[in-house]
Amino acid sequence: MRSAYPGYLTPTQEEFKTLWNACLFVFDTSVLLNFYEYSPETTENLKKIMTALKDRLWMPHHVGWEFVRRRRTVIHKQNKPYEENMKKLKDVLDKIAAKDSHQVLSDPCLQKLKAAIDSVQNEFDQAKQKLEDSHVTFLEDLYKGRIGPAYMREEKAEIEKEGQKRYAAKIPPGYKDKEPEESPTDNPCGDYLIWCQMKIHAKSEAKPIIFITDETKEDTWWKLPNSKTIGPRPEMIEEFLSDTEQRFYMYSATSFLKHVGEYVNVPVDQSTIDEAKSLQLKKHGEALAKLSTVREDAAAKITELTKVCEDAAAKITELTKVREEALGRLAELF
């Protein structure tokens, strides 16, 4: 049965071992951007793991494009709370040192306070610069000669056209990205572009692929009605096997970290697994909150539109009555 329905039956332990020993590892944009959100310790641990797997890494061109395009937005999000708090500290200092206020602190004390705030600002600025550069430098070295080619313009347009047809039919992956609020990039076919690039590479290299992603949408994962995740969408596993004659499997960052020590003998700290899980849950909660807001806004608009329709219907009824009365009077006159 496993050979007949490979997408619906979880691989055996031996099949997993064979897959892990032979595969290429593809890290999705969502995982690479986590470098900017993990603690320095967890980031370094993940980098060590990726370095240990260096000879078996490969990056679809569109993953790299999404990373370089979106990373500054993630950096800004991480820096914003610090920038806001630094501004508050400086505002407090300005108020305390204002000439028109009663000064309780002496000038030497104020100078010490200012020096302390300047020191914090300097350390923050250095950390920002390191955040800007260090991860890019690491990935440039890690993926040198391991990034797939970009699509030609005409080829990309054809794939995007095909992607839109698949999305309309809800064929995974990526059909949730057809809705602008669901897409993390300006290209709603991004997931499908990556999917096609992985299939092309797997077929040309005759290698199976393990894809590591922190995307949680139903267009990627097979979920039960209670939201429990079973694994990758069966359609994806079977399509990949049919088109490439290679196996495909998928893990979240947390699940990958749990299994990499078992199959590849790469040590992983439990704290790294715990933080990866914590960030994944946080992002899932943010996604649910965003979806809830979208639904509430839609419900409010529907309510507003319903009221407009009801008012319009009342007006039409009123005008109809006026028209009938007018016609009745005309009939009396003639």
Image (cartoon, helix red, strand yellow):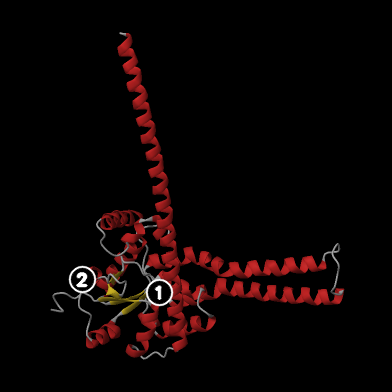
Measure how far apart labels 2 and 1 are at the Cα level: 29 Å
Is residue 184 among what the camera can see? no
Q: In this rendering, which labeled residue sits more in front, label 2 or label 1? A: 2
Q: Secondary structure at mark 2?
A: helix
**Rendered image quadrant of residue 86:** bottom right
Type of amino acid at the residue the image marks with label 2? Glu
x and y percentages locating residue 103 in the rendered image: 86, 70
Residue 251, position in %: x, y? 34, 77
Whether residue 22 appears in this view of the structure is: yes
Residues under numbered marks 2 and 1 in contact, where contact means CB atoms less than 8 Å apart: no
The one of 87 and 240 positioned closer to us in this rendering: 87
* Viewer-proximal residue among 10 and 91: 91
Label 1: few (<14), some (14–19) or many (≥20) C-alpha neighbours in 10 Å: few
Q: Is 3 placed above or below 161 here? A: below
Rendered residue at 48%/64% (across/down): 70
The C terminus lies in which quarter of the figure?
Answer: top left
Position of residue 260 in the picture relative to residue 282 (left or right)? left
Residue displayed at 86% across by 73% down: 107
Q: In the figure, residue 179 lies in which quadrant?
A: bottom left
Q: Is 18 situated above or below 111? A: below
Q: Nearer the viewer, residue 19 or 290?
A: 290
Residue 231 placed where, x, y %?
28, 75
Mark carried by residue 238: 2
Residue closest to the eye, 97 or 212: 97
Q: Earlier in the sequence, mark 2 or mark 1?
A: 1
- How would you rate the neighbour count of disc 2 (Cα within 10 Å): few for under 14, some for 14-19, many for 20 or more? many
Label 1 sits on what residue type? Gly
List the residue tagged with mark 1: 145
Point 20% across, 78% down: residue: 9
Identify the element where label 1 is drawn.
loop
Residue 167's spot in the image, x, y percent?
29, 57
Q: Quadrant of the N terminus?
A: bottom left
